Image (cartoon, rainbow, N blue to C red):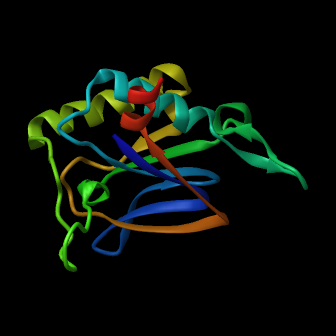
Amino acid sequence: MRGILQKVNYAKVLENESTVLEIKEGVCVFVGISEKDVEKDVEYIAKKILGVRVFDHDSTSWKKSVFDCKKEVLCVPQVELLKEIKVGDQPEIPSPMAKGKAKNLYEKLIEKLSKLYDPTKVFSCEFGAKSDISMSNDGPVTIFLESQKATIIG
């Protein structure tokens, strides 16, 4: 499971130029799910989303997480995060997961975030829907998360 976590001043989900979902300060996380992903990956990514310290920066480090600061979380499913360019210029997905199974794991991620955190601060785009995302990246701060390397190593 891959994630791109961005610290945001705001993030909006738009449909036909109308806002259907919006968060204020927090993180927007784009999530990609591969055929190798299992519930252990869901647990790992959920804990990273809530625990990565990207808030309360001083001259040496960031001190607080989404969990510490009670910020909002917006998750956006994005299969393109799995794409890689191996030869030439055409991105390809090496091992995509079947849509139904991927949707199930994505929904488990949202459930896990809601259980570990405040469910009123966890928001999600609909899996498989075309969404336009508008956001203001704060910092900018962008963090790459990947569960497979973590689960293989440790």
Position of the N terminus, as image quadrant, is top left
Q: Between residues 64 and 26, which one lies in front from this camera angle? A: 64
Which residue is drawn at the image coordinates 26% and 26% (left, top)? 38
**44 or 24: nearer the eye?**
44
The correct choice, above or below, for 53 with respect to 108 in the image is: below
- Please state the horizontal and vertical placement of residue 136, each as a whole percent of the image: 59, 68
Residue 105 in the image: x percent, y percent? 25, 31
Place of residue 36 in the rendered image (x, y in percent of width and height, measured from the top left): 21, 34
52 to the left or right of 4: right
Number of labels in the image equals 0
Name the residue: 19% across, 72% down.
87
Residue 151 x %, y %: 40, 27
Q: Would you place residue 115 above or below residue 84 in this image?
A: above
| Residue 69: quadrant of the picture | top right
* Rendered view: 133 above or below 59: below
The quadrant holding residue 83 is bottom left
